[in-house]
C-alpha cells in the first residue's frame, strides 16, 4: 500500500461497520446526484481509478458505479468534512443518469402537500439501461 | 401526531439506530454545506418548524442547528432518495456559515497531492461564533 493510501485511511473516521457516506455531486451543475457508502478499499480504488467505487451494503461487494449501466461517475474532486466522517465527490456523471430508476438524480421526490411527490422524469427506462431489452 | 407526520415516518428507511443521513445544500448556490443525522422526531420538527433540526449522535439530543451560533438553516425544500434512506434539504444558511470551524461549508478540505488541503477560509472565529469573546 502506498503512503498516500495509508495516510488516507488513517485520516477518516469510519463508522462501526468500517464505512463512511459519500455524496456524489455533479461537478458542473452542483446537483446532488446520490449518496452511497465507501469502505477503505472502495475509497482507495475511487482515488486510484478516478471513478466512484462504492461498497454495496446490501450485496456486500465493491460496487463500481456504472459497471452494468455504463453510468460511470468520473471523479473530479474529493472533499472531506470537518469531522472526517463524510466524503463529497464532485463527479462527471456519464450518461447524465445517476439513479437506477433512470433519472438524473436519486433525489427525484420532493415533500409537498403531505406526500413525496415525483418531480423528475425518467430519462431512460431501467430495462433499457440494464439490458433487459435490446 | 398528524396523519402527515405518521405517513412521513412510515415512508422512510431508518437505519438500525433509527436515523437517516440528511444533506444540507445551499438552495441558491447548490453548495453542499454539511451532512448530519435525523431521527423521526427531528425530521418531524424540521418540517413543522421549517428549519433543520438534527439528532446529535455524540450528545444524544435534538440539535436545532444554529441554536448557539445563530446559523440557522431555513428549510426551502426537502427531498428523499430512491431508497428512502437519505434526505436532501435545500436550505437558506443564515449567517453564511454552516461549519463550526467558522467556514461556509463543512467540506472545506480537498484531496490533493496525497493530503487533505484546506481550501476555504474561516469567515468568523469559532470563539466569536460561540460567544467566548464579546
Image (spheres, coloured by chain):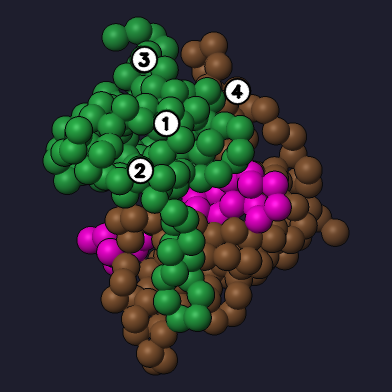
Chain colours: A green, B brown
Separation of marks 1 and 3 at Cα, in angstroms:
19 Å
Q: Residue sitting at 78 percent across and 46 percent down? A: B124
Residues at marks 1 and 2 touching, judged by CB atoms closer than 8 Å: yes
Marks 1,3: beta carbons within 8 A: no
In percent of the image, x 64 and y 27: which residue is there? B118
Query: Which numbered dot is residue B117?
Result: 4
| Left or right: A131 as drawn, with respect to A125 | left
Mark 1, residue position: A95
Q: CA distance from mark 3 to mark 2?
A: 27 Å
Q: Is residue B120 visible?
A: yes
Residue at 28% over, 32% down: A69
User: Which residue is situated farthest in the top direction here?
Assistant: A2
Residue at mark 4: chain? B
At x 30%, y 46%, the residue is: A125
Q: Which image quarter holds the C terminus of chain B?
A: bottom right
Determine the chain carrying the residue at label 2: A
Choose the circle earlier in sequence order: 1 or 3: 3
* Separation (CA) of disc 2 from disc 4: 39 Å
Residue A56 is left or right of residue B56, and the answer is left
Q: Going from the N terminus, do you reach mark 1 or mark 2 first?
A: 1
Mark 3 vs mark 2: which is more N-terminal? 3
Range shown magenta: B13-35
A118 up-or-down from B125: above or below: below
Q: Position of residue B36 (x, y in %)?
A: 47, 55
Tell me the residue that label 2 is attached to: A124
Q: Secondary structure at mark 4?
A: strand
Amino acid at each position: 500500500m502506498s503512503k498516500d493510501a495509508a495516510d488516507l485511511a488513517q485520516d477518516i473516521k469510519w463508522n462501526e461497520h468500517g464505512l463512511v457516506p459519500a455524496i456524489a455531486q455533479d461537478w458542473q451543475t452542483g446537483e446532488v446526484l446520490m449518496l452511497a457508502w465507501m469502505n477503505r478499499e472502495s475509497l482507495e480504488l475511487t482515488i486510484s481509478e478516478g471513478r466512484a467505487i462504492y461498497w454495496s451494503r446490501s450485496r456486500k461487494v465493491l460496487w463500481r458505479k456504472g459497471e452494468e449501466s455504463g453510468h460511470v461517475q468520473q471523479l473530479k474532486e474529493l472533499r472531506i468534512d470537518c469531522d472526517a466522517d463524510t466524503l463529497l465527490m464532485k463527479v462527471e456523471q456519464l450518461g447524465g443518469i445517476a439513479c437506477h430508476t433512470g433519472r438524473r438524480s436519486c433525489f427525484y421526490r420532493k415533500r409537498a402537500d403531505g406526500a413525496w411527490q415525483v418531480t423528475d422524469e425518467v430519462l431512460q427506462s431501467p430495462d433499457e439501461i440494464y439490458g433487459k431489452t435490446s
